[in-house]
């Protein structure tokens, strides 16, 4: 509930601080006194956009602050989702700066207007002629029926299953689309894959193949060089091994005469061993090296195949070709297995659809049972409000399509008078009739669910004294379970409030200012007497006012 409201430098309001209690709160005042200004200020803390025209003094900022007691409103999740501190007494502050910029805070945390508007929708419901158009929307009509049908748990289960169903359906559609597109590319992908498979690619083999090719392609020249090298090492007269052997023997004899030459002798001995090993390796290499035109052709063919594949796929190495091969294998395999996946996903969709159907039918049955209760209560309340011939024809029909709130279409038809046929509510009901229907619905809803603070903005315009009594009684009944504000011109309604505030204008230093004050018992008698008989209060008006208050 709204526990306090502070408005500074807004429109005709210089400074206003007011506390509110629960129950039925009456706001009265002469035409033009500023009741709409009060609503406008409240609308700002509920997320309405603002401009510089809102400032009374253009050199100072406008500040509007409202405190709400929100325990029992189940708003902890909202606060958590929006990273706000949850407080049982939540304070919303809106500031409009002289520069035209606007700032909003919830419990001192800055928020944007979307968050503010979202929170405001849970806190205050301003009932006006414009808002009655909600009545013509299916979503609101379903909400009313569901309140009486107590389908909240079923709807939560339905919406969870609806997500499962939509996810499975979306995946199935993606698979079907993939199958359709992939089938067009399948032959080409298989052709590319076969080329890569036939190439028998091995990671890192390109360097080895290129080396083998260079060797086989130059066998005769390589053998000639190896033979020359062998001769250089092994010639009896001038060969390196013969000369190195002679060198070692000389140093060995010198080391026998002096140990000073022992190290040199050992070093040349090590070199001689290495040269001998090199000589053996050269002889083996020469013996093993033979021309092999067939192998040369095989190596050349494989190299050419690899080069062609690298060019075709615009890559530089075998590792990249192997990665392309793996990707193609995955694509080809996926298409080969797609039918199995589609069958599995179709089964999942069918299973989710079956579960969803079951919940939807339960919701449908509960709604069907609740509709007669709703129509009976509506016609009863509307009869009290002067619409004695009002009738409703509300029907829900199971459809072939799943919606976010069930599997039904809703027809909410209305007839205001005898002898008239039923028609869509938005087409056949007048603004005044819609306003009374909305009041009736809110009165009914207040018995079945926790509603936010509701503010009726001159809902009694153009009604008779007897009907106004009924309207007042309805609002009085609603106020037993919720906070109800009503802005009214009718004394019959004003007298039913638990508390009464008056909006008035006064000129201070030739500046008109709007103020709000709470009336005590004597003030209320005078105010209601004036509402009955005008400025000149008669004794009969005073007596009538006291009678109404009693």
Image (cartoon, rainbow, N blue to C red):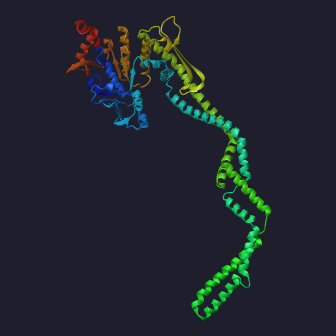
Q: Residue placed farthest to the bottom in the image?
A: 257
- Visible residue check, residue 73: no
Q: Relative to the observer, which residue lies in front, 429 or 466?
A: 429
Percent from the top left, x then y, of residue 59? Answer: 27, 29
Percent from the top left, x then y, of residue 160? Answer: 54, 33
Q: What residue is shown at x 67% (from left), y 37% (from top)?
A: 181
Q: What residue is shown at x 74% (from left), y 66% (from top)?
A: 218
Q: What residue is shown at x 58% (from left), y 32% (from top)?
A: 166
- Visible residue check, residue 34: yes
Percent from the top left, x then y, of residue 386? Answer: 41, 8
User: Left of 465 or right of it: where is 353?
Assistant: right
Percent from the top left, x then y, of residue 414? Answer: 50, 12
* Residue 237: quarter of image: bottom right
Q: Relative to the observer, which residue lies in front, 473 or 502?
A: 502
* Residue 75: quarter of image: top left
Q: Relative to the observer, which residue lies in front, 461 or 196?
A: 196
Q: Quadrant of the N terminus?
A: top left
Q: Residue placed farthest to the left in the image?
A: 509
How many numbered callouts?
0
**Quick check: 513 above or below 177?**
above
Q: Quadrant of the C terminus?
A: top left
**Quick check: 528 above or below 8?**
above
**Quick check: 252 above or below 39?**
below
Q: What residue is shown at x 56% (from left), y 21% (from top)?
A: 409
């Amino acid at each position: 509930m709204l526990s306090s409201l502070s408005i500074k430098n807004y429109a005709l309001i210089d400074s206003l601080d007011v506390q509110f209690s629960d129950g039925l709160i009456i706001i009265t005042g002469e035409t033009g006194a500023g009741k709409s200004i009060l609503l406008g200020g409240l609308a700002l803390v509920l997320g309405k956009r603002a401009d510089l025209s809102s400032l009374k003094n253009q050199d100072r900022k406008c500040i509007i602050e409202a405190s709400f007691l929100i325990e029992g409103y189940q708003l902890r999740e909202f606060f958590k989702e929006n990273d706000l501190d949850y407080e049982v007494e939540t304070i919303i502050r809106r500031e409009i700066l002289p520069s035209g910029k606007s700032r909003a805070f919830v419990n001192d945390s800055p928020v944007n207007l979307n968050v503010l508007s979202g929170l405001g929708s849970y806190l205050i419901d301003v009932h006006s002629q414009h808002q009655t158009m909600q009545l013509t929307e299916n979503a609101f009509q379903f909400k009313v029926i569901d309140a009486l049908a107590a389908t909240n748990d079923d709807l939560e289960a339905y919406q969870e299953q609806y997500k499962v169903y939509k996810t499975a359906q979306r995946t199935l559609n993606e698979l079907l689309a993939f199958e359709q597109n992939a089938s067009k590319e399948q032959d080409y992908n298989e052709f590319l894959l076969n080329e890569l498979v036939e190439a028998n690619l091995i990671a890192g083999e390109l360097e080895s193949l290129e080396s083998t090719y260079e060797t086989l392609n130059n066998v005769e020249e390589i053998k000639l060089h190896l033979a020359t090298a062998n001769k250089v090492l092994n010639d009896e007269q001038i060969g390196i091994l013969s000369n190195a052997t002679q060198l070692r023997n000389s140093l060995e004899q010198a080391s026998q005469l002096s140990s000073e030459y022992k190290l040199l002798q050992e070093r040349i001995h090590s070199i001689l061993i290495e040269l001998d090993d090199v000589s053996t390796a050269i002889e083996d290499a020469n013996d093993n090296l033979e021309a092999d035109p067939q192998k040369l052709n095989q190596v050349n063919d494989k190299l050419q195949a690899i080069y062609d594949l690298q060019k075709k796929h615009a890559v530089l190495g075998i590792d990249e070709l192997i990665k392309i091969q793996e990707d193609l294998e995955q694509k080809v395999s996926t298409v080969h297995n797609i039918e199995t996946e589609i069958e599995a996903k179709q089964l999942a969709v069918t299973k989710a659809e079956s579960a969803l159907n079951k919940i939807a039918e339960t919701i449908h049955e509960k709604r069907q049972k609740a509709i007669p209760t709703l129509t009976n209560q509506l016609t009863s309340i509307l009869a009290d409000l002067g619409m004695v011939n009002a009738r409703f024809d509300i029907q829900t029909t199971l459809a072939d399509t799943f919606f976010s709130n069930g599997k039904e279409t809703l027809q909410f038809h209305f007839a205001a008078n005898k002898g008239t046929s039923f028609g869509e509510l938005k087409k056949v009901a007048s603004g005044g009739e819609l306003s009374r229907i909305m009041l009736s619905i809110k009165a009914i809803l207040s018995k079945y669910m926790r509603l936010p603070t509701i503010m009726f903005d001159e809902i009694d315009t153009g009604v008779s004294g007897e009907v106004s009594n009924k309207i007042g009684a309805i609002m009085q009944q609603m106020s037993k379970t919720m906070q109800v504000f009503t802005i009214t011109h009718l004394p019959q309604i004003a007298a039913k409030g638990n508390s009464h505030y008056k909006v008035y204008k006064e000129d201070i230093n030739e500046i008109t200012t709007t103020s709000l004050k709470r009336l005590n018992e004597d003030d209320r008698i005078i105010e209601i007497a004036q509402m009955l008989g005008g400025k000149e209060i008669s004794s009969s008006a005073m007596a009538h006012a006291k009678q109404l208050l009693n």
